[in-house]
Each structure stands twice: as structure tokens, then as C-alpha cells.
Image: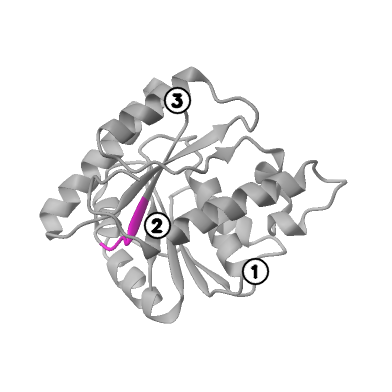
């Protein structure tokens, strides 16, 4: 079943947050999800240790460079979706995981410096394509954006990706306190209480749109470098 890999060489890009939002949304829809937490900081494992993790979501954290391919392939036979959160460096583990990706998601904030880091991730994926002689569909996901304002700088960066044949998500992960809250309180967005955080409904709608677009991309795979 599909393996979705989140890759970014830059910390703070929203990689783990986006990965948890997707995995939790898929699991809440009833799908079985195996989440491979390959980030040395283990943010997802810490989230999963708190109450409220969906019953159909399993977290694997004990993976190494030597075992990650086996872990992905075995999980893909057991779960409807495999989600992988990678470390923020261009390591052998990152390369191996990308080689098994049905979709590589590259989270980035909307600045030129962050976009340059996203380009590094794209270059790594292209190298893995050559090394393993396979196409790895990829898409750039803008994170921590404003729900109300779409700056001209962000539009320009998005257009530059598209002009260079890179698929860009139409959905953006907005800056939401609810996304930070699930890492504090545990569980999913729908499990948050109004006295814990505000604008829960808007956060849920954003996460659902992201999950829906991801499924749409998986159903209509693009060739490497093909724009959305």
C-alpha cells in the first residue's frame, strides 16, 4: 500500500506536524496506518505516547539505516498507508526511505531561504531516482502560512516551483495553535477541547483538505518533475 515520506533538510519546516496531521486524519477515517518515526528527536513517538492516538495508527520508532527498508516494506503489507517522518539530513537512511516512496512530501515555509532548502530535498530525490532507477513522485507543501493573507513573496516562490515543473500542493498547512496543541495534549484535532485551544474547526478543515489532496495525488501519480 502507499508509502508517503516526509523529507526536509531544514528544521522547523513543519515536517513532523504535517506528517502527524496526515496520519491522524487517515486513521480517523478508519484506515490502518503505520507511522515510521525515523527522526532522531522522536517527536511523533512522544505524541503517540500521550492519550488519544487513533487505534488504527501504529508507530514504529526503532528503525536504523540497516532496517528501514525492511520496516517500510513489511508495514506496506500490513497497513493501508505507511507514513515516514525522516531526519533532517541527507543520510543513507533518508535515501533508503525515499527509494521506497510512492509520494515524497517536502514541507517548506514561504521564504526564499526555506525554498532553497526544499530544492536540496528535491535534488536528493532526483539522485535516488537515478540510483534506484525508479520514479519518485514528489510535491512541495507550504507550511505555517497565514489563512487570511497570501503574500506576494509566497506567490512568487510557488510560481517558481511550478515553472520548474515541481508539483505544489494547493492546500497549505496554516499556522494554527491547534497543531501545536496536539503535541502537548496528545490525540487528534477532533479530540481537542474548546478550553484547550481555539479555532479547532478551522484546523480540522485544513487537515482534512491536506489529506484529501494527498489521496488525490496518490490516485493520479505524476511523472517526476511534472507540475500539479
Task: Decide: is 67 above or below 194.
Answer: below
Residue 108 x, y percent position in the rendering: 43, 35
The residue wearing badge 3 is 155
Residue 20 x, y percent position in the rendering: 55, 55
Left or right of residue 41, residue 3 in this image: left
From the viewer's perspective, is the residue at label 3 or at label 1 nearer? 3
| Crowd tier of the residue under label 2, counting other residues whose Cα lies within 10 Å: few below 14, some 14–19, many 20 or above | some
The answer to whether marks 1 and 2 mark residues whose Cβ atoms lie closer than 8 Å is: no
Q: Hey, which quadrant is residue 63 in on the image?
A: bottom left
Counting every numbered tag in the picture gives 3
Left or right of residue 202, residue 58 in this image: left
Residue 209 x, y percent position in the rendering: 57, 52
N-terminal-most mark, 1 or 2: 1
Residue 197 x, y percent position in the rendering: 80, 43
Q: Hey, which quadrant is residue 55 in on the image?
A: bottom right
Give how far apart the Cα atoms at labels 3 and 1 are: 36 Å
| Crowd tier of the residue under label 1, counting other residues whose Cα lies within 10 Å: few below 14, some 14–19, many 20 or above | many
Question: What span is in magenta?
Answer: 100-104
| Secondary-structure class at tag 2 | helix
Left or right of residue 198, residue 153 in this image: left
The colour style of the image is one colour
Give how far apart the Cα atoms at labels 3 and 2 are: 21 Å
Question: Residue visible at 48% across and 54% down?
Answer: 213
N-terminal-most mark, 3 or 2: 3
- In reply to whether residue 156 is colored magenta, the answer given is no
Residue 217, disc: 2
N-terminal-most mark, 3 or 1: 1
Question: Residue visible at 24% across and 59% down?
Answer: 99
Where, quadrant-wise, is the N terminus in this rendering? bottom left
The residue wearing badge 1 is 54
Amino acid at each position: 500500500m502507499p508509502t508517503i515520506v516526509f523529507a526536509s533538510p531544514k528544521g522547523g519546516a513543519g515536517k513532523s506536524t504535517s506528517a502527524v496531521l496526515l496520519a491522524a486524519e487517515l486513521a480517523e477515517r478508519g484506515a490502518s496506518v503505520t507511522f515510521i518515526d525515523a527522526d532522531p528527536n522522536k517527536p511523533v513517538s512522544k505524541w503517540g505516547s500521550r492519550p488519544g492516538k487513533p487505534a488504527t495508527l501504529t508507530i514504529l520508532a526503532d528503525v536504523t539505516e540497516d532496517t528501514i527498508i525492511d520496516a517500510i516494506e513489511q508495514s506496506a503489507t500490513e497497513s493501508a498507508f505507511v507514513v515516514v517522518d525522516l531526519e533532517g539530513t541527507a543520510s543513507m537512511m533518508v535515501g533508503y526511505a525515499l527509494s521506497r516512496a510512492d509520494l515524497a512530501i517536502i514541507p517548506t515555509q514561504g521564504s526564499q531561504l526555506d525554498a532553497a532548502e526544499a530544492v536540496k530535498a528535491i535534488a536528493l530525490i532526483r539522485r535516488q531516482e537515478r540510483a534506484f532507477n525508479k520514479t519518485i513522485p514528489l510535491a512541495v507543501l507550504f507550511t505555517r502560512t497565514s489563512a487570511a493573507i497570501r503574500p506576494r513573496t509566497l506567490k512568487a516562490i510557488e510560481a517558481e516551483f511550478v515553472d520548474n515543473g515541481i508539483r505544489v500542493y494547493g492546500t497549505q498547512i496554516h499556522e494554527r495553535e491547534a497543531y501545536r496543541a496536539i503535541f502537548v495534549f496528545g490525540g487528534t484535532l477532533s479530540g481537542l477541547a474548546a478550553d484547550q485551544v481555539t479555532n479547532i474547526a478551522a484546523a480540522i478543515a485544513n487537515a482534512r483538505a491536506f489529506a484529501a489532496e494527498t489521496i488525490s495525488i496518490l490516485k493520479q501519480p505524476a511523472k517526476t518533475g511534472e507540475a500539479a
